[in-house]
Amino acid sequence: MEINIDIDLCFKELREFIFHEETIKNASARTVYNYYRDLLLFFRYMKFIKEKSVRSVPVEDIYITDIDAKFLQGITYEDIERYFYYLKAVRNNNAATRKRRVVSLRSFFRFAHLNIEVIGKDPTEKLVTPKLGKVLPKFMLEEECVYLLDSVKAPDKERDYCILVLFINSGIRLNELVGLNYNDIDNQGNVTIRGKGSKERRIVFNEACLEALEEYTEAKKMLFEGKSYDHNAVFLARTGKRISARRIEQIVSKRMAEAGFGGRELSPHKLRHTAATVMYRRGVDIRALQQILGHESLGTTQIYTHVSDAQIAKAMREAPIGRTKKQYK
């Protein structure tokens, strides 16, 4: 996902909110970008329903820079309900997307009400978050991981192999991998990770990770010999600058397709699920796993206990010993 915030598209209070999230709350770039694009759409739709003069213009093209405190004060809970009907009926937003947009609206209106005090009442107070069905995370089996790694070929073999190994073995997040520096890793494989909200945690890279890093580092030195490049960033693009999150997503997608897993939508986040599932199945304590993954809530980590239970049930159902009734037919 391209992260590009055009502050000139925002009205005064929205600019203040974005700066507040970036500087005071120290939210991640992706979180701030999600707020930005969610709120642009919301306020464009608010102008569409409240101002007849713009109804001939597509919602996505409506300018909102003239929105002021008076306009904000006029937004009601009923307006917001109408917006969420629009999201579902017209834009076909699923429950997960609508849930994210609820969070964006709550964050902005709480800021407008409590921080800058431009509205007397928060219209999102009664807003209900859409319920999401419990879905077990997608992941790869261990033998599939081995096959994937064995399938990595040139070009960029060492870099792409190293990316996959780190995802599969450490459970590192995509943005954490992008921001990884050599001075974050000591000689014993202890790694300082800066996660969501710039919170730091310590993890350990195992022997497979360290070997892959060493091979990639040597290949990188040869590739950029005599050229200018970022010496501290672990993963680089061909320009010599730190690789982007979007480029890593493309690399993972490409390598998955080459290994024959292209139809399973196995993203970097799914590889993180794979690492967590493997660690839990191998006996890692659930609280230790919480620390490794950087989860604030233990409840988030406990999804992997359900994954393990599902695997056990599947294995037991698929391998009956002795003849069944079906076999007599």
Image: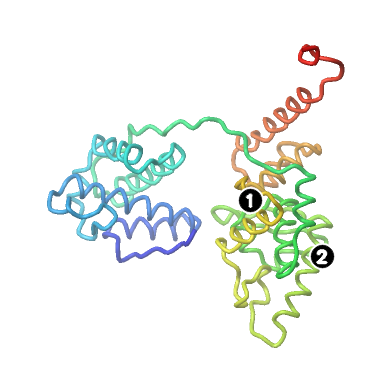
Q: Nearer the viewer, residue 91 or 210?
A: 91
Does residue 236 appear left or right of residue 189 in this picture? Answer: left
Q: Nearer the viewer, residue 310 or 285?
A: 310
How packed mark 1 is, by other alpha carbons closer than 10 Å (few <14, some 14-19, many 20 or more), is some
Give residue 262's mark: 1
> Which corner quadrant of the image does residue 222 belong to?
bottom right
Residue type of the residue flagged with mark 1: Gly
Whole-percent x, y for residue 101 in the image = 39, 44
Q: Which residue has dot 2 on it?
A: 187
Q: Residue at x 49, y 32 (%)?
A: 132
| Circle 2: element type | loop
Does residue 300 appear left or right of residue 126 in this picture? Answer: right
Question: Is the C terminus in the top left, top right, bottom left or bottom right quadrant?
Answer: top right
Give residue 226's mark: none
Whole-percent x, y for residue 283 in the image = 80, 37
Residue type of the residue flagged with mark 2: Asn
> Which corner quadrant of the image does residue 37 belong to?
bottom left
Q: Residue at x 70, y 54 (%)?
A: 167
| Circle 1: element type | helix
Q: Nearer the viewer, residue 226 or 113?
A: 226
Q: First in sequence, mark 1 or 2: give its number.
A: 2
Whole-percent x, y for residue 9 in the image = 30, 63
Dot in front, 1 or 2 = 1
The number of numbered badges drawn on the structure is 2
Whole-percent x, y for residue 16 in the image = 33, 59
Whole-angstrom CA distance, mark 1 to mark 2, is 36 Å
Q: Is label 1 in contact with label 2 (beta carbons under 8 Å)?
A: no
